Amino acid sequence: MKSITLIISTCILFCLNSCSQDFEKLSDSDVDKSKVKIARDFASDYMTKLKNGEAYQFQDEAIDALKNQLTEEYQKTVYQQLKDKFGDFQSLDYVETWIQGSNNSLKIIRFKSDFDRSSKKLEIRVVLNESDKIAGFWIKPWSDML
């Protein structure tokens, strides 16, 4: 019984240790402005299309998994929920870029966005991979912590 408890405890400790995420915020001087532009253009175009009642039509700017997840119906449903709660999308402003530990192949680019019926900011988060393709996209309440 003691050996089973020890094995399970070791496994849990290993899992927790391997799953911990070591994120690092890049200083302004280390941020690649071209990557921020890619993320900003995508997020702004995406949100503006939805605001205008259209769905964003992906080309080659995103990975296939993201394109498959963000179907036209899903995009419109999520935007309607945002609109019902916060109003229409107005603008977004770049805030910061993060990387995961020493692995700088993924860039997490965070924007604060404004919606016309809310004084609260929402975060629009865009993840770029090493090929400068959109690998992740989230809209959530703003938090100063990543």
Image: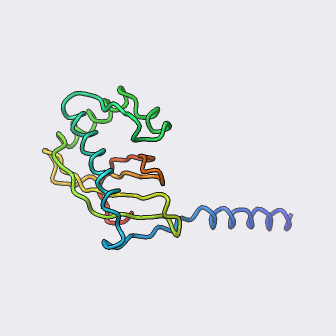
Figure quadrant of the C terminus: bottom left
Name the quarter where the N terminus is drawn: bottom right
Name above or below for residue 67 compared with residue 131: above
Q: Quadrant of residue 145?
A: bottom left
Question: Which residue: 60% across, 61% down?
Answer: 19
From the viewer's side, name the closer residue of 102 and 142. Answer: 102
Question: Residue 113: percent from the left, percent from the top?
Answer: 22, 52
Circle count: 0
Q: In this rendering, is residue 59 above or below 94?
A: above
Residue nearest the viewer, comparing 2 with 101: 101
Residue 24: percent from left, percent from top = 44, 70
Outermost residue, left direction?
116
Can you say whether 78 is above or below 104 in the image?
above
Q: Which residue is nearer to you in this view: 39 or 11? A: 39
Report the residue at 47% width, 67% height from top: 23
Residue 97 in the image: state x and y as whole percent: 36, 63
Question: Residue 106 location, x and y as percent?
Answer: 47, 57
For the rendered model, the colour scheme is: rainbow
> In the displayed structure, does residue 39 sit left or right of residue 8?
left
| Picture layout, residue 121 above or below residue 117 | below
Residue drawn at x 45%, y 39% is: 66
